[in-house]
């Protein structure tokens, strides 16, 4: 036998001899040590771990999916989901980053109207998840987050497990979740999960956190324990007080230039219908700010692009769940930060919102304080029927005729708004790089024959301006806190919710946003989630380019350096190659505008057979 070589038989004999010697030494050592009362690993079987009961509890909520990056702090719960629970309702979805897990749940909840679950690993996983949780908080979206942790230090494995455990796990997120708990028993876990789900789904909807202790997961269920799963009942959304609604109706019925501004008003198609009913009763223009699909873009009262002009002339403004009411009446110039009032000094402001029910102070999502003439605490969608009924009672025969007399003018103004938009979109139609208006229009042409959903309808803005949208599921709004890295995973989550509804989900995907968590492409391919991603590849964080240009102008310095540190070039990223490497069908980069439509046609065919597809188009900055 050479010094360099060792045949398999000799290796096995040598290994066996070494193993026997080590075993003998271990036996001698063990005789002088106290034998662990619980036995060594492999010496006992736990037939009914606590995590099995946890799965029963989660199933009782109706949660269908749990998105997660696998980790040791919830290893028992993970195993129970896939073996005891059969990996069905909930199904475990493998993600490459906790931020993607939460963002997927964010998009899913907006499309499905109910939360899905997330499993996050101790200190490190919850920190990874934090930005996505904040996005969901600012967007008022329910997410059920389960955090793994080993609270009892006496049972932690030495080394890494200590780094990954934390005294107060939910404390990292407490400033931007609605409620959290760290149950100390299985019964406590059952009751807290039901409470958390109920809190999450009661408007204002928000994320919640439940910590699933590792020892509770892994220890056997006491045979004498009388465990029960409480019945889950959801609370009816709170409505505005009737007297306040009558006062609001009187103010609106008497207004000469009423404007309705909606932001997160509608949660469903019924909410959209109720919005139309209220607007038509008052024959009042509606400005949809787009955090949800609140109002049909085809309706003659839809005037979203004329919001500033309408507010400037308004004598009464009704706001419905508007995140930033001050910003609708005022503006601050950039970069000078100089304040300017848009609305008339004596404009009357009515706001129906539950924002005052959220009592947090550290994170500044409350926006600037805006005094109202009439502030009504209530969920907008739940309040609309009573408000509309009060309005109809206030409008007498002569007033009704006067309001109806505005219709022709309102229809004409709606047409003019649409014509201006189409004319603006046509500018540079054949330009290279591709204009963002052309990008949006090509996507519309590719999907207009299907039931469709645009998972992020605020990116670019052209889609909300150009596309005829009538269904609540058409536009899902935006990230909430504008945290980069949310769009791609949220779109995949929305596509998951729409998969069995026959709704084709698409997203205009910014390049920089995708690079925060590109692994979500693998998740979409692995779990066969059909989604059409059209890359808005401007090869930059273009908003930051513009910020640097503003600063250079303010400082009277050169602007050509604004691309340093803000662009994604040298080298350019091949997004089609990136997608294909993860199992996603892809084409691009496309630079010829005429090549977009054929590529999208091929991509739609892929999506319709149940797979994700990506088309990379090199575009102008904005």
Image: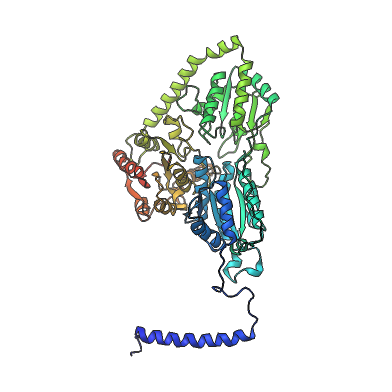
Question: x, y percentage for residue 279?
Answer: 55, 22
Q: How many marks?
A: 0
Q: Residue at the spot x=60%, y=27% of the render?
A: 384
Coloring basis for residues: rainbow
Question: x, y percentage for residue 160?
Answer: 57, 68
User: Which residue occupies the foreground of this view, 527 or 538?
Assistant: 527
Question: x, y percentage for residue 66?
Answer: 51, 52
**What is the quadrant of the C terminus in the image?**
top left
User: Which residue occupies the foreground of this view, 518 or 71?
Assistant: 71
Question: x, y percentage for residue 402?
Answer: 56, 11
**Picture layout, residue 118 above or below residue 302:** below
User: Which residue occupies the foreground of this view, 219 or 360?
Assistant: 219
Of all residues, the one furthest to the top in this rendering is: 398
**Picture layout, residue 151 above or below residue 344:** below
Of all residues, the one furthest to the right in this rendering is: 243
Identify the image quadrant of residue 74.
Answer: bottom right
Of all residues, the one furthest to the bottom in this rendering is: 1
The answer, for residue 604, to whether it is visible in the render is yes
User: Which residue occupies the foreground of this view, 225 or 197?
Assistant: 225
The answer, for residue 174, to whether it is visible in the render is no
**What is the quadrant of the N terminus in the image?**
bottom left
Q: Residue at the spot x=50%, y=88% of the render?
A: 21
556 left or right, relative to 188:
left
């Amino acid at each position: 036998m050479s010094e360099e070589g060792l045949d398999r038989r000799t290796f096995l004999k040598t290994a066996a001899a070494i193993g026997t010697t080590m075993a003998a030494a271990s036996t001698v050592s063990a005789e002088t040590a106290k034998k662990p009362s619980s036995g060594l690993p492999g010496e006992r079987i736990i037939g009914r771990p606590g995590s099995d009961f946890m799965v029963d509890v989660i199933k009782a909520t109706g949660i269908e999916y749990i998105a997660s990056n696998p980790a040791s702090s919830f290893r028992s719960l993970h195993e129970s989901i896939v073996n005891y629970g059969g990996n069905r309702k909930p199904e475990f979805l493998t993600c490459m980053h906790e931020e993607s897990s939460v963002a997927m749940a964010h998009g899913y909840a907006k499309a499905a109207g109910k939360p899905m679950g997330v499993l996050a690993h101790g200190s490190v996983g919850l920190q990874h998840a934090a930005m996505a949780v904040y996005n969901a908080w600012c967007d008022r979206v329910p997410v059920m987050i389960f955090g793994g942790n080993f609270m009892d230090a006496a049972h932690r494995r030495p080394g890494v497990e200590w780094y990954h455990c934390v005294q107060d796990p939910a404390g990292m997120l407490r400033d931007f979740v609605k409620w959290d708990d760290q149950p100390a028993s299985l019964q406590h876990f059952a009751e807290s999960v039901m409470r958390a789900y109920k809190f999450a789904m009661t408007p204002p909807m928000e994320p919640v956190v439940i910590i699933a202790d590792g020892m509770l997961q892994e220890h056997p269920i006491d045979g004498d324990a009388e465990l029960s799963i409480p019945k889950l009942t959801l609370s009816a959304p709170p409505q505005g007080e009737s007297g306040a609604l009558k006062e609001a109706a009187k103010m609106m019925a008497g207004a000469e230039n009423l404007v309705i501004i909606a932001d997160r008003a509608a949660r469903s198609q019924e909410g959209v219908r109720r919005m139309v009913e209220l607007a038509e009763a008052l024959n009042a223009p509606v400005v949809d700010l787009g955090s949800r699909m609140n109002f049909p873009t085809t309706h003659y009262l839809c005037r979203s692009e004329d919001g500033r002009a309408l507010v400037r002339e308004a004598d009464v403004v009704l706001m419905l769940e508007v995140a930033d009411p001050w910003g609708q009446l005022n503006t601050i110039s950039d970069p000078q930060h100089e304040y300017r009032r848009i609305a008339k000094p004596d404009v009357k402001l009515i706001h129906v919102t539950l924002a005052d029910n959220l009592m947090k102070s550290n994170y500044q999502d409350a926006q600037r304080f805006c005094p109202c003439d009439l502030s009504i605490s209530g969920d907008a969608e739940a309040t609309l029927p009573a408000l509309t009924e009060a309005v109809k009672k206030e409008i007498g025969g002569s007033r009704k005729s006067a309001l109806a007399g505005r219709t022709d003018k309102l229809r004409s103004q709606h047409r003019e708004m649409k014509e201006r938009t189409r004319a603006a979109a046509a500018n540079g139609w054949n330009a290279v790089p591709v204009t963002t208006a052309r990008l949006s229009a090509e996507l519309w042409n590719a999907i207009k024959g299907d039931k469709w959903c645009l998972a992020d309808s605020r990116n670019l803005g052209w889609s909300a301006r150009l596309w005829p949208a009538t269904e609540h599921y058409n536009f899902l709004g935006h990230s909430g806190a504008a945290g980069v890295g949310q769009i791609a995973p949220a779109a995949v989550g929305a596509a998951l919710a729409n998969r069995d509804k026959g709704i084709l989900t698409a997203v205009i995907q910014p390049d920089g946003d995708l690079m925060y968590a590109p692994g979500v492409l693998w998740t979409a391919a692995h779990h066969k989630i059909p989604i059409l991603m059209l890359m808005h590849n401007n090869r930059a964080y273009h908003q930051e380019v513009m910020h640097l240009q503003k600063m250079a102008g303010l400082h009277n310095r050169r602007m050509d350096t604004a691309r340093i540190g803000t662009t994604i070039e040298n080298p350019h990223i091949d997004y089609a190659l990136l997608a294909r490497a993860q199992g996603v069908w892809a084409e691009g980069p496309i630079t010829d505008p005429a090549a977009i439509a054929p590529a999208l046609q091929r991509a739609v065919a892929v999506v319709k057979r149940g797979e994700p597809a990506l088309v990379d188009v090199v575009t102008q900055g904005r």
